[in-house]
């Protein structure tokens, strides 16, 4: 099953509708109160991250379910380059992207996917890069890979993160100009 696709923007437009859609999916799938809350928390974290992104951004949000697997999708199409990204980050007080906490790292991976298709920056935030003919064709960051490579200080962040505790997998990927985040929860 695929839910309705909700258009959201980083000005907050569509976030309430995305959360209502998540609640509707939980009701439709007859989830327990605990499982419904977990799904809502994951949706809140995901949509809250969109609001924190810089620049003009519109994205599509939906949920796909198959059996007991729920996938929350956030997808955007971008033609942004690293120069645009640098100009956007220059507006911030520090002039750089702040990555404190686990969801901030996920946000950084998503921003890297949106703001730069260049290998050097993508590698710096842990995105795997495959190049073809000088173009970046696909890149992906996953929670599973992050956990495998986590240092001691990263484990502290993981232990405090709602998403890291509740999600079975988180993926941020680039495919051409499409950037997608998927949070997967098995219930």
Image: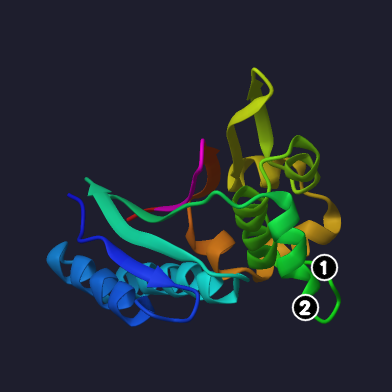
- Circle 2 packing at 10 Å, graded few (<14), some (14-19), many (20+), is few
Coloration mode? rainbow
Rendered residue at 32%/56% (across/down): 187
Instruction: Say above or below: 34 vs 81.
Output: below
Residue 90 figure quarter: bottom right
In front here: 131 or 134?
134
Q: Is residue 177 magenta?
A: yes
Residue assigned mark 2: 92
Rendered residue at 75%/49% (across/down): 125
Residue 135 figure quarter: top right
The disc placed on residue 96 is 1
Instruction: Judge left or right: residue 2 versus residue 59.
Output: left
Residue 132 figure quarter: top right
Residue 111 x, y percent position in the rendering: 64, 57
Residues drawn in magenta? 176-184
Residue 179 x, y percent position in the rendering: 51, 48
Rendered residue at 38%/77% (across/down): 15
- Disc 1 is placed on an element classified as loop
Residue 105 x, y percent position in the rendering: 69, 60
Instruction: Judge left or right: residue 156 versus residue 131.
Output: right
Residue 144 x, y percent position in the rendering: 60, 43
Instruction: Say above or below: 85 vs 88.
Output: above
Residue 171 visible in the shown view: yes
- Disc 2 is placed on an element classified as loop
Q: Is residue 147 magenta?
A: no
Most extreme residue toward the top is 133
């Amino acid at each position: 099953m695929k839910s309705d696709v909700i258009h959201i923007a980083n000005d907050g437009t569509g976030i309430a509708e995305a959360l209502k859609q998540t609640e509707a999916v939980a009701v439709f799938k007859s989830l327990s109160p605990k499982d419904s809350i977990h799904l809502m928390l994951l949706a809140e974290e995901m949509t809250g991250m969109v609001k924190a992104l810089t620049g003009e951004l519109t994205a599509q949000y939906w949920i796909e379910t198959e059996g007991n697997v729920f996938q929350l999708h956030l997808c955007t199409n971008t033609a942004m380059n690293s120069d645009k990204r640098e100009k956007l980050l220059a507006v911030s007080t520090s002039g750089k992207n702040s990555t404190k906490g686990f969801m901030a790292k996920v946000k950084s991976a998503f921003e890297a996917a949106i703001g730069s298709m260049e290998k050097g920056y993508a590698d710096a935030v842990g995105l795997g890069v495959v190049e073809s003919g000088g173009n970046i064709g696909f890149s992906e960051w996953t929670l599973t890979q992050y956990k495998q490579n986590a240092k001691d200080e990263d484990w502290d962040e993981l232990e405090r993160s709602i998403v890291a505790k509740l999600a079975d997998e988180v993926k941020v990927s680039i495919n051409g100009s499409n950037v997608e985040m998927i949070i997967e929860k098995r219930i």
